[in-house]
Each structure stands twice: as structure tokens, then as C-alpha cells.
Image: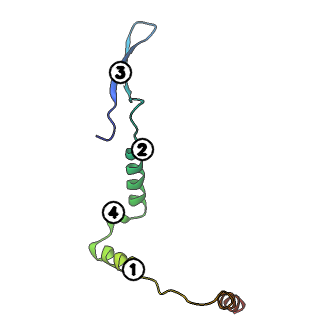
Amino acid sequence: MLTEPIIGASTMRRRFTVYRWVKDDRQDDEALDTMIQATGAAIKYGVTALSDVSWMKLEAEHETPLVPDQADHEELMMRTSSRSCN
């Protein structure tokens, strides 16, 4: 288990017992929180519904190395300025 809360009993003023889930202060549950948030994001953005073909397409897109641009600093500035003027 990622976290293991226990049931703790405490007696109230009116002499009845209240049972509550109590987490050990020495135990962290960040792994559980991260897993829950990642699962929620995957469901929200439709990752869980992707087919095998879609996964293969995404994998091919992300594994293809980018072509490095060997332009000088001045050439890069001219490219961006000429695009913005059009």
C-alpha cells in the first residue's frame, strides 16, 4: 500500500466513542497524490482512450530528432523580422 491509515478511537465529552481514519505523521502520501493527479489529467485529456495506432503515431513524432538550425545570431534575427513584416 502507498498509505496505510488506521482507525483511531477517541472518547468525546459525552462519553461516546468516535472512530476516525488517522494517518501516521511519519508516513508520506505524495506518491498517492501524484498518481491520482496524473490519472485525472490522463482522463481529462483523453489519453486513456487512445488506440494503439494513435500511440504509435505519437511515439514516432516524439522520437524523431529535430534538425538543428545552424544559423548565426544575425540570420535568426532577420528570419523572425522578415516573417513578422509579411
Q: Quadrant of the N terminus?
A: top left
What amino acid does circle 4 point to?
A: Thr
From the image, tell me which residue sits under label 4: 48
Disc marking residue 31 = none
Disc marking residue 61 = 1
Using the image, determine if residue 8 lies above or below residue 85: above
Helix, strand, or loop for circle 2?
helix
Residue at the spot 40% in from the left edge and 76% down from the top edge: 62
From the image, tell me which residue sits under label 2: 30
Label 4 or label 2, whichever comes before in sequence order: 2
What amino acid does circle 3 point to?
A: Gly
Front one among 80 and 16 = 80
- The image position of residue 9, as x and y in percent, is 36, 17
Disc marking residue 8 = 3
Is residue 83 toward the left or the right of residue 21 in the image? right
Measured Cα–Cα span from mark 2 to mark 3: 22 Å
Measured Cα–Cα span from mark 3 to mark 4: 37 Å
Q: Quadrant of the C terminus?
A: bottom right
Label 1 or label 2, whichever comes before in sequence order: 2
Measured Cα–Cα span from mark 1 to mark 2: 32 Å
What amino acid does circle 2 point to?
A: Glu
Helix, strand, or loop for circle 4?
helix
Measured Cα–Cα span from mark 1 to mark 4: 19 Å
Q: Badge 2 local density, few (<14 within 10 Å), some, or many (20+)?
A: few
